[in-house]
Image (tube, rainbow, N blue to C red):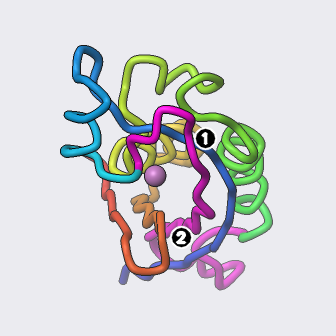
Amino acid sequence: MKISINRKAHFNAAHRLHKEGYSDEENLKVFGKCSNPLYHGHNYELIVTVTGEIDPETGFVMNLDILKKIIKDEVEYYLDHKNLNLEVEEFKKLNPTAENISVVIWKRIRAKLNSKYELKVTLFETPRNYVEYWGD
Ligand code: NI
């Protein structure tokens, strides 16, 4: 029997969505307000979902303190209060959309998580817009 546990986290970050070679006007048309050349911030809300079997010895899927620490090290420390375009390696050539941020977060957590677990990340860029990534 598989069951999912969830941990919520939060970070603030600045970004700008744009395509190299587009004029400011074209970027505005494609990326809307997120194309602001002088950047802007979002309050990102993250839900990390780990799915696995219940360990009969502990009754846990995994110890949430361990998951909390992985999220703190791999997501909060890495992204909180950063300018994603300028300060985060992955986004120097990749648009920091909610989709791409979710993939980066998923890969960073996946690398620290026992392979027996399934991982999903849900990232809210605004209270109404969110992205889910289950991995590839
Ligand atoms: Ni934005």
Question: Where is mark 2, residue-wise?
Answer: 47
Task: In this rendered view, identify the residue nearer to me: 80 or 18.
Answer: 18
Q: Distance between the Cα atoms at labels 2 and 1?
A: 17 Å
Dot 2: element: strand
Answer left or right for 120 relative to 21. Answer: right
Rendered location of residue 122, percent (x, y): 43, 66
Image marks 2 and 1: residues in contact by CB distance under 8 Å = no
Assess whether residue 59 is covered by the magenta stretch. yes
Identity of the amino acid at label 1?
Lys
Question: Where is mark 1, residue-wise?
Answer: 112
Mark found first going from the N terminus, 2 or 1: 2
Q: What span is colored magenta in the figure?
A: 34-63
Decide: is 16 above or below 7: above
Identity of the amino acid at label 2?
Ile
What residue appears at the point 61 percent right and 44 percent down from the top-left corner? 14
Decide: is 107 above or below 7: above
Task: In this rendered view, identify the residue nearer to me: 106 or 26.
Answer: 26
Answer left or right for 125 relative to 22. Answer: right
Assess whether residue 25 is covered by the magenta stretch. no
Quadrant of residue 55 in the image? bottom right
Rendered location of residue 69, percent (x, y): 78, 54
What residue appears at the point 48 percent right and 18 percent down from the top-left corner? 92
What residue appears at the point 36 percent right and 42 percent down from the top-left corner? 100
Decide: is 127 above or below 82: below
Which quadrant does the N terminus fall into?
bottom left
Answer left or right for 52 relative to 108. Answer: left
